Amino acid sequence: RGAFCQCIDSNQGAYFEQMLLLPCVLGEFRTQCRGESQAKRIIGLPEHITSDLGSVGDFAAGSELAFGTVLQRSHAVLGARMHYGHPDIMNKQYMMQQGGVSKATKTLNLSEDIFAGMDFMLRGNGRQIRHCEYFYLTKGRDLGFNAVMSFFSKISSGTGEQILTRQMFRLSQIMHLPEALAFHYAHAGYYLTQAFISLSMPVTISTWLLVLASDCEDTFQAFMNCPAASASQAMAIVLSAWCSWVLAFFLFVQTLPLVAQMWMEM
């Protein structure tokens, strides 16, 4: 029954005062004539994480807060947002046309939610995915370290499996360059960046050790062209440049959106 569907997890709930805003959310689908593009929408909604208990729970809640508010807001503007969260409300008729909301294969379609948005956008004809933040649902995350790590492993594994799917291949062919770059960084590019960051630390330490080990020695100065500054002085100059206002500027720029979001919610 009904023309709209909303997927809810077993660990989610709702507030009574938020349910009073449900007609406003359904009004996002309202059109003047049948078949207009405004009805072809997926309305994305944020989540209020209530399990910020302990250091691990606070970490999981903080990551969900950043992903459900700041990142989803940016992805929706850039055209890279797909169906990520289970509070999203969809037009059931268009979901039935594409074979349902989620996929059933647990290996290739491990992150099953995103394929609803991929198949939805591939059909074109005025379809769009919006992100509205005046309506939200509650959600409880895991509090154990192993459970949190297994969840992030599942998300990263699902992103790796997405690269093999025909949906991502076809979307990469029809998207414009700005949308394709945003779509890449919102999915596989994010985890590739994290892998490069993890590899950059041992590469940097190895480079520093190589520079320090290749410094001139007093017993071989007659056979070597030694510069005026030693290797340790050169590395000190480089470190002082990296750990100065440049590092502070990047840290400030990275954390400013999340701090502003948390300040507005408090």
Image (cartoon, grey):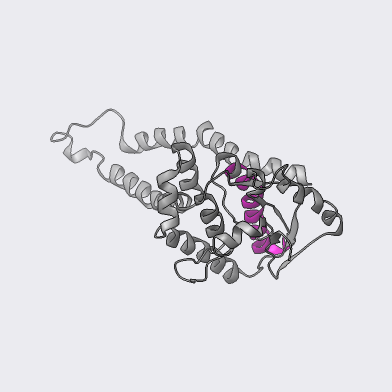
> x and y percent of residue 48 in the render?
73, 56
Going by the image, does 166 lie left or right of 155?
A: left
* Viewer-side residue, 236 vs 88: 88
**Magenta residues?**
51-75
Is residue 68 one of those drawn in magenta? yes
Q: Chief secondary structure of the magenta span?
A: helix
Q: Where is residue 112 in the image (x, y as percent from the top left)?
A: 54, 64
Q: In which quarter of the image is the N terminus?
A: bottom right
Image coordinates of residue 239 in percent, x first then y, are: 43, 37
- Is any atom of residue 85 visible in this view? no
Q: Which residue is drawn at 45% across and 42% down?
A: 175
Which residue does the image show at 62% across and 55% down from the upper left? 63
Residue at left offset 70%, top offset 61%: 6
Q: Can residue 19 be seen in this view?
A: yes
> Residue at 42% across / 60% down in the picture?
165
Residue 187 on image: x %, y %: 49, 52
Q: Inspect the magenta stretch and tell me whether residue 181 lies in it.
A: no
Image: 1 above or below 62:
below
